Image (tube, rainbow, N blue to C red):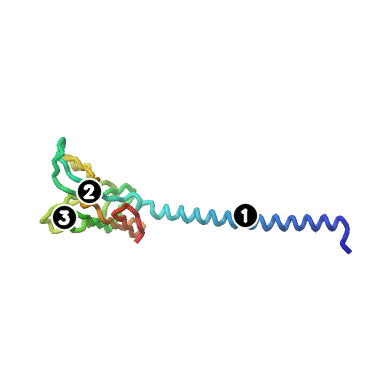
Amino acid sequence: MWGSPADWVTAVVALGALGAAVWAGLTARDVDRVEAVRDLAAADLRRRSQATQVAAWIVVKLEVGADTGRGIGVVVHNSSDSVIYDVEIVTSAKNERVPKPIRLEPLPPADFYVREKPGHPHGWAFAKATSEVTDAALRPVTTSRDLRVQRLTFRDSADVYWERTRHGALVER
């Protein structure tokens, strides 16, 4: 009626094997979830890799060897290996004045200086590599809430649009 001792041992071993199989399945599911999250994070990092290497900040152009300012400008930094497109930089100025946006198309990898040029149709002079600015020092403006880059938008080489906010956050648009 209850079977022999050999039947009991077989039944206990079978139940143990079933428990081990269930545990292995649950563990495999958990490992798969962890790997999926990791793969998504790695894909996001790859997708953002060029965009994280683009930034802009306000600078004062100073006479060499002096603290006399010769104008306000923006340094645009692209340390990626590829060109970026549709670059627009919105800045703010003192006395709540809003300069015209800077528009650059395309922007190759390098650091560029763009100076404000009142009276120019675009409001800004042409961009030049910071290495070409030899007659002055470009000092970042770090103590003013009035003079700052409010927004930097651009399209990366993968055709993804990005925005770097005034606080430095990088957001896909």
In the image, 126 versus 38, the foreground residue is 38
Which residue is rendered at x = 35% and y = 55% of the image? Answer: 170
The earlier-in-sequence mark between 1 and 2 is 1
Q: Which residue is mark 3?
A: 95
Q: Secondary structure at mark 3?
A: helix
Mark 1 vs mark 2: give the one in front.
2
Residue under label 1, please give it: 27
Q: In what quadrant of the picture does the N terminus appear? A: bottom right
Q: Are marks 3 and 1 in contact (CB under 8 Å)?
A: no
The amino acid type of the residue labelled 3 equals: Asn
The residue located at (58%, 54%) in the rendering is 31
Q: How many marks?
A: 3
Marks 3 and 1, the one that precedes in the sequence? 1
Who is closer to the viewer here, 166 or 125? 166
Secondary structure under tag 1 reads helix
**Disc 3 residue crowd, few under 14, some 14–19, many 20+, Cα 10 Å:** few
> Which residue lies most toward the bottom here?
1
Real-space Cα separation, disc 3 to disc 2, in angstroms = 12 Å
